[in-house]
Image: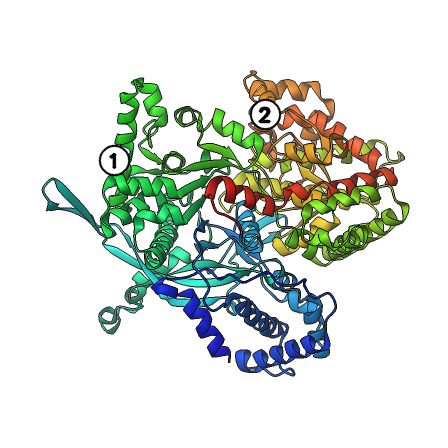
Amino acid sequence: MLNEVLSAFQRAEDKGAAASSHPTVPARTAPVRAASGDAVTDLREAILAKLAYGIGKSPATARERDWFAATALALRDRIVDACVQAGEPVPNKRVYYLSLEFLIGRLLSDAMNNLGLVETTRAALAELGVDLGTVEGAEPDAALGNGGLGRLAACFMESMASLGLPAIGYGIRYDHGLFRQSLEDGWQREAPETWLAEGNPWEFVRPEATYTVGFGGHVTMSAVSEGVIRRQWHPVETVRAVAHDVPVVGWRGSHVNILRLWKAEAEAPVDLGQFNGGDHVGAVASRARAEAISRVLYPSDSSMAGQELRLRQEYFFTSASLQDLLRRHVAERGDVRSLHDHAAIQLNDTHPAIAVPELMRLLLEDHHLSWEDAWHVTSNTLNYTNHTLLPEALETWPVELMERLLPRHMQIIYLINWMHLEEQGKQGNHDAAHLAAVSLIDESHGRRVRMGHLAFHGARRVNGVSALHTELMRSTVFRDLHALEPEKIVNKTNGITFRRWLHNANPGLTRLAVEAVGERVLDDPEALRGLEAFAGDAGFVSRYAAMRRGRKEALAQIVADRTGIDIDPAALFDVQVKRIHEYKRQLLNVIETVALYQAIKAEPHRDWTPRVKIFGGKAAPSYTQAKLIIKLACDVAKAVNDDPEVADRLKVVYLPNYSVSLAEAIIPAADLSEQISTAGMEASGTGNMKFALNGALTVGTLDGANIEIRQHVGPENIFIFGLDAAGVQARSAVPNYARDAIWASPRLAAALDMIASGRFSPEEPSRFRPIVDDLRHRDQYLLTADFDDYWRAQREIDAAFNDPAGWWRKAILNTARMGWFSSDRSMREYAEEIWRVKLG
């Protein structure tokens, strides 16, 4: 029977000789609330069968990982059942979401929750003497992303499935995702992350969906008719892209989409001639080079070899994805000229921007369209999401590297650029500075291809991810291009999936919401508004506080287990967990911690609000300054936590190896959410949404989605400090602003002096002087300018926390008013205004 089901799923997947079709099923009834006996028995027997025949283990010999794999396989069968529908029509339009990152984390809880099988699975495992929590904990995090970009892509995939929006996600099946972080005496150490060490029970390997991706070589020209010349690329190296499909099941099991991840393989696994000749290592060199493409997420690009590998990764997955979707479209529709009518391709940041010349190449060379027809299809099918205003994140590639690695694409880029600049001339724009600003080639510091400009020019729509970010896109990085096409840039504020970040991460709060408002909160995030009526209800507030206390106790146990530090659940849990970057200003938080430490030491008998500062996040392996900030945070933690004069009034914790699953434990336990980036530099943020949804109060700048969060939760329920984006720009233009800010703030000066003195690094007194010197003389991210107002906001927070009734009211109102930030809302807006796809 299983083979028949999988064969049916395979037929649906390859319908019409396409590489993948889009499975859709009618909406199901509500998820199972209480497990029925028959359902429990069926699932229990299915798990046992998978354990025996899929894993080859008996209950007596099974490890926790084996029970997880057997449970995942049993649930995967049920997802397949939801997938397969005989006679399913081809959707009129399908979304293709291209992202170099998909930070999907653990999938078991998502599958159980969305299929309505949480309690059924719990009961089935319990009958086998196995704890569901233990099974969930045995699943490794699929860390196929670095942070918010990858987690956003995962949320969007889940929301598209929940909304019944036909979609396929495309990415890379990295052997090793984001590195595993450990802290050795406070220094970050990186080790390979091995999520695939024992396989991935969720995926289906699709060897029939394999494509050839080329690199290097040369381009030839041939005359096909009078006045018509065809160019053909002849790569010198080819790599196979093999599809691995992970089903993404939507809410209530009503719809299943596919996340297709590409694995890189060599055309031949070994050169037998070399091997038999004795060169056993050289015989597999080409295989190692090919497989390196999907080996590691974000290899360091500090070397030329690293830059080349990053470009190879981006082109590899983009080319395979475009070949796949074109094959599917031709099988379903016949003519590629109609691609834009039946497909919307979303480029998630600049990583897949090479899609512009690659789609043109495929249409020109493989499908023989004219240049005009190919450009019409390309520019009406592609859309581009920009996620950053930081220059280093708006990728540019050396022309020399592009010409060597992708010679045909460089020809196409040159021609696109020539036609683009010629059009400017026709419109009377002959100014050299203007032409240089809008050119796809930056010639100011060596010749480099501007991938953001390329994506902008080749897209039908370009979107920012928060209101502020979108306005800054129009006025800064894409100012000149925006002036040429003022309707192209639109805003689509990010969102998060409530199924993961409320239902799964915080079942206690979810139960409270259901009891107060009804089960409609499970389907309609805006129904959380009903909690406003309970923000002053003593009984509800008491249950809410007890729920939060339980989550804080659980987090305290995790902290003790992983760091050996004991923290008091009654204290204010002040949390900053995210990628470590100077613009995110973890350093501002650390310096305020030092200042608070000094204040407590100066007035030990004062009634200080007990506070636990919790940090977490990874620094890029080559980001020296970020790693030094982690070391400073750890050294400050050691000094503060070992000081008996401070006792439990201040504790500092750095939790290593921050991940999606760790976030699910931290976020529901947080009292305070630190969103303190330099205004104008965080595109949106989604961590701010997750914390606020779970009732943490935000301390933040007017940056990214903080602005919209304030609008929705109310200015009285959020703590805002510091310069806004305009203020940052104005202050940055003032000479010696950092020196003046330090001189005007004795508290800041004293904290910096303590850090520079070696108080936190007595064995190496000068260790942190580079940090302090940078703040005194440069301070690119304006920590000094915002410090005093940040201190003020933190003391306001102390006072608010000492008023429990007022604090819980603010917390409950945050949860109640966050419904707009659902990724379901984001996806509806994309579907209606960018992709032009009708929801089912």
The residue to which callout 2 is attached is 725
Residue closest to the eye, 48 or 56: 48
Q: Residue at x 55, y 35 (%)?
A: 683
Q: Is residue 282 above or below residue 640?
A: below
Rendered image: mark on residue 415: 1
Q: Is residue 311 visible?
A: no
Q: Which residue is at a point 66% across and 67% down the rendered structure image?
A: 117
**How many residues crowd mark 1 within 10 Å: few (<14), some (14–19), many (20+)?**
few
| Residue under the image location 57 percent in, 35 percent down | 466
Question: Which amino acid type is marked by label 2?
Answer: Ala
Left or right: where does residue 276 sit relative to residue 637?
Answer: left
Which element carries disc 2, helix, strand or loop? helix
Task: Give coordinates of residue 113: x percent, y percent.
Answer: 65, 61
Sequence-earlier tag: 1 or 2: 1
State the image quarter where residue 429 is shown.
Answer: top left
Residue sitting farthest toward the left? 226
Q: Is residue 79 left or right of residue 382?
A: right
Between the C-alphas of marks 1 and 2, the distance is 38 Å
Q: Are marks 1 and 2 in contact (CB under 8 Å)?
A: no
Q: Quadrant of residue 261?
A: bottom left
Q: Residue 693 appears at what percent x and percent y?
A: 70, 45
Q: Secondary structure at mark 1?
A: helix
- Residue 2's disc is none
Among the 4 quarters of the image, the one containing residue 740: top right
Q: Type of residue at label 1?
A: Leu
Residue 833 image point, x, y percent: 50, 39
Tell me: residue 741, above or below residue 236: above
